[in-house]
Each structure stands twice: as structure tokens, then as C-alpha cells.
Image: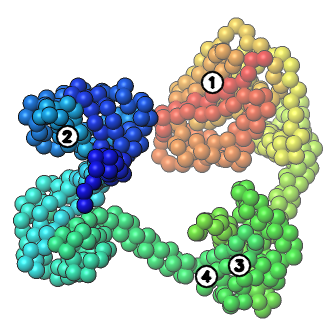
Amino acid sequence: MIYNREEIEENYRDLFEHSLDLIYVSDLNGNFLDANDLTLISLGYEREEMSNIKFLDLLEPDESKIAYTDLKEIIKTGKQSKRREYKIKVKNGNFIFLEAFAVPLKKNGKIYAILGFGKNVTYHKKAEQKLIDSEEMFRALYKEGPIATYTWKKLNDDFVFIEFNNMAEKITNGNVVSFLGHRASNMYKDRPDILNDLHNCSNRKINITREMKYKFQFTGEEKYLLVKYGYVRPDLVIVQTEDITDIRVAEEKLRESELKYRYLYENTPFSIVLINSKGEIVDCNPRTETLFGYKKTDLLGKLFHKISVIHPDYLPIIVDLFKKFIKGEKVHRIDLMIYKKDGSLLWVNLQASLVQLENNYFVQALFTDISKRKEAEFLINEEIVKLKELDQIRKNLISRVAHELKTPLASICGGAEFLTSVYNNQIGKEELEILNLIDKGGNRLKYLVDNLIDISRIEYDKFKLKKQMNDLCEIIKESSIEMNHIIKERELNLNLNLPYKLYLNIDRVRIEQVIMNLLSNAIKNTPQKGTITVKAETQENWAILSVSDTGVGLTGEEMEILFTRFGKIERYGEGLEYIDIQGSGLGLFISKEIVDLHGGNIGAESEGRHKGSKFIVKLPID
């Protein structure tokens, strides 16, 4: 078949336009002269625009230099040495990758244009880059991953250790490198389970996850491991091991703790009842059955307030406490009565706590049998009532006896004093001694009666003060003068260290009573030739009165009972013959009450037996 020129040109044009490659024609300077439709579409330009574009301008600077060199080579040699891959910038600013090759066009043996062929390899290039990126990411993940990773290569039905990551090196302190190139059959000859997993993963093309206990050869340490065998290809298996020892140890401790709790729960002497937020009983321990007399099956699923257990008097209180407890409010423990299944009543103490189990909150009620304690309390209360009655009888008796004795004692003391003073010269010596004994005994008994009356007033809260401004120094001097005959009789030295005046708002009679008591005690407990010192001074807003002696002193036990009711101290023995043991043990108790009512305080100091003592009274300066 013979084609004419027009037909040939038409066939070439048709091939040019419909080619699967990019085809373009440029002059010897790289300016586009023509291009097929695929080239225009790929570059994004219209045909009219192409005439103003130079091929070299679409390239990166470095690639433009290479393309210019290739162009010179084609013009010079008539051919291009090899295909090139160029990164072409298209009209919209994006890039495509073009695998290009060019040949010269000749006319009359002379090159007048360049014919270029190009294949758009952008998709393949991006796919290659993704593959590279993916491999780099995998490599980074493999190397820097948080889980120890090992690679095994299958060789002659065995596996060789060929690679490991940083974490594997870290957890083995670098010892893992010594196992590179070792065969699994040698490393795990005592662990057929590991060898089987490697073979199963490779042969069956599956991934396997296994938990095992493993002893490391390089440290001798035994750990719990989560092992994952990952199939890559028939001759390659990746193994990852995660240390879960802490988790398993914690689980074991939790299991032990649960067993201990269960043992305590089952064997505790207390009844434990678990109640949900609706008030339903969801669990109880064996002690509950014995305490309440109900079987566990009788209680589970029942509303606690619908069971005839709680005494009606306490049911509203318990329901209210339950509502508060569920809201998170703190509630106190409570004693209540419950009915056992046989109808008998029982006293229990209820203590509750809020517990969380599997994201649900429950009230844990703890019941303790307190029946015996309650019986003891009832007995104690009965005894307290009886003791109060006896104490009241005692108070009444003391008050009545004291007042009944006061009048005849006044007559006895007055009569003895009258007979002694009026008939002194007419009475014989023996009779006069008897009258003196009657007078002394009467006065001593009168002093005791006065103290008993004061005690009675204190107990009935009728001990009142009559305060006014008085000179404390004057009261001390007068009291000393009144006691002077006894001081001289016992051959004692009395030193008064007082300011000129010291006025206080006090009850003169009662403070004089305190001073007389302190002086009397000092005189009774100080041997002959001993010294008693009375001192008064002020410190800030206080008046300080002290009475010290060089007498028998006080022991720790004696100081504990000094200011108690009837706290009389009995002291006998060699070297203590001088002590006057007479007294009721009420003086210091009453003195303390008097000082307390004045807003002050009283105390004693002593370094021990035969080292003297010191009584200190502090009174406020108004």
C-alpha cells in the first residue's frame, strides 16, 4: 500500500495526539514549538501558552543545568546518552515527575528541532517515597520502640537471631549483642514452647501472643513476659517481649489481699452486711446468720428496712442515717435494738462505711453484739443512781449533824470558858486541867463542825463570798499574832516578808481562813527550832502569797491528795514524832475552794521528805 504525503502526515499527527506518552517539540534553545494533548493536560497549559514557555524554566535549578547539558549533547552528537528523570513544575504550582528522553529532528542532514518523549511517573515516584517513608518509620519504630523487639531469620528449619532494638539492649544491659548469630535450637533447647511458637508463626503465617515465665541467662532474673510472635515472611519472624512482672506481682498481691479479706470477712466476729444504694442487701457474712438467726438466702435481695429486724423505735433513725450516708455525709455509730428471727431482742452497735466495688458504691454495715455491755451499763446506771442517793444521804447527814452539833458545842465551849475565867481561883488544879481539856476538845470539835458546814455549803453551791477591798498584809499579820502562842510553844522561828500594804478585793474572813490553815499546817509539820516564812509580793496582775517551812516535806503521792476532800496525810515513824497528826483533812480542800472562788489558784512544792514544803496562793489584783 502506497500512502501519499498528506496521509502519512495525518497518521503521524494522529499518533502524536493520541500517544500514551508526553510528546513535545522544542527548538534548539528549549522553547516549546508543539506538544500533544497529554503534555498540555499534564502541564496544565493551553496550547497558545506553550509557545511562551521554555522547557528549562520548568525545572529546578540543578536539574535545569543537567537538562541544558543534555540538550547540548543532542545537538552535538545527535543523540542523548541516557533517559533522565525531571521534577517539573506545572501551572498550578505543583510538581510532577517526568521520565524523559529526546532525539534530534533533521532536515537536509541538519538538526533544526528537538523531539522529546516523556512518561509521567509521579504516581510511581510517590509510591516509592511512601514506601521509603514507611520503611523509615518502621525502622524508627523498630529501633526506638518502647517494647523489646528481636528479629529471627529462618535457616535450614532453624532460626538465627539477626537483629534487636534499643529497648532490648537496654533491658539486658547490652548483653543481648552476644547472642547475635546464635540459633534458636541452641538458645532455647530447654524451652520447646518457644521453638514451637517460632515454627508455627513462620509455617502457618500467623501471629501468636503468649504469656510466659522466663529466666534471663545473662542476669539469672526470672520475669513474667508477654511475648508476641509477628509473621513478616516465611523466612522472617519478629518477636516482641513486654515485661509484665510488676503487673503480675501486683495481681498476686491483690489476690492474696482478697483472700485475706475474704478470710476476715468470713471469720470475723462481727456481722457484715453489704447494702446497695437502693437499700437492698447484696451480701452478708456467716456471722450475720448466727447473730440475726436468718439464713443468707432469707436476706439477699431484700430491702433492709422491710425485714422485721430493726426495732420500730430505731427504724426511722436508721433510714434517715442511710439516706445521709448515701449522699456522702458523715454519720456517727449508733447503738440500737434488733429482733432475731426467733423474736428475741438483741442490743447491737452499728458502724457503717461507704465502699466502692466495680464503680458502684455500697454501704458496708458492721454490727457488733453489745448485749453484755448494755447489761453492764444498766447495772452501772442502777449503781450510780444508788450511789447518788447515798451521796445525797451523806450530804444531808453531814449538814444535819454539823448543825445539830453546833448549838450544844457552843454551850460546852462557852460553859468551860466561863468556869475557867470566873471560878479560876476557886477550882482545884485537877478540876482546872479537866476544864482546859474540855475547852480544847470543844474548840477542836467546833473547828471540825465549821469545816463540815463549809463542805455542806460547797456541795449545795451555797458557799458565797463577801468581797471588799482589804489589806492582805494586815490579814497575814493578824493571823500570825493569833498563832503566835503555838509558834512559841513549839519553839519555831516565824519570818514575815511583806510589803507595806497590799490591797485586794477579797472576802476577809475566808482569806484569813486560808492563811490560818496554811500556818497551822506549817506549824504542825515543822520540828522545834525550825523556820516558817510567810512572803507576799506582786507579779504583773497577781498577788503571790507563799508559806514555806523547813519541816517534814511532801512526797509525790502525798502531793496528789493534798487538796482533796478528807485528804488527810498520816505520817508515822522514827524522826516524825514532832508532827501533830490531829486534823480532819478538810482544811486544804476548803482553802482551795475559797481561792478558786476568788479567781486564783493554790499549789504546793516540795523536794521530798525532810526537805520542807512551800504552799503558794495566787490571787488576782483587780
Q: Between tags 4 and 3, which lies in front?
A: 3
The C terminus lies in which quarter of the figure?
Answer: top right
Q: Is residue 528 visible?
A: no
Q: Between tags 2 and 1, which lies in front?
A: 2
Q: Between tags 2 and 4, which lies in front?
A: 2
Taking the image as shown, residue 452 lies to the left or right of residue 404, namely: left
Q: Is residue 562 visible?
A: yes
Q: Quadrant of residue 253?
A: bottom left
Count residues near mark 4 (Cα–Cα under 10 Å), then give few for <14, some for 14-19, many for 20+.
many
CB within 8 Å, label 2 to label 1: no
> Residue 102 shows which numbered tag?
2
Q: Between tags 3 and 1, which lies in front?
A: 3
N-terminal of the pair, mark 2 or mark 4, is 2
Name the foreground residue: 338 vs 258: 258
Q: Between tags 1 and 4, which lies in front?
A: 4
The residue at the far top in this view is: 500
Q: Please, which colouring scheme is shown?
A: rainbow
Q: CA distance from mark 1 to mark 4?
A: 67 Å
**Residue 367 vertical position relative to residue 427 in the rendered view, above or below:** below
Taking the image as shown, residue 174 lies to the left or right of residue 32, namely: left
> Residue 285 shows which numbered tag?
4
On the image, the x and y values in percent for residue 79 come to: 11, 39
The N terminus lies in which quarter of the figure?
Answer: bottom left
> Residue 546 shows which numbered tag?
1
Count residues near mark 2 (Cα–Cα under 10 Å), then give few for <14, some for 14-19, many for 20+.
many
Q: CA distance from mark 2 to mark 1?
A: 128 Å
Q: CA distance from mark 4 to mark 3?
A: 12 Å
On the image, the x and y values in percent for residue 495 come to: 60, 18
**Which residue is found at the position 55% from the left and 24% from the top?**
531
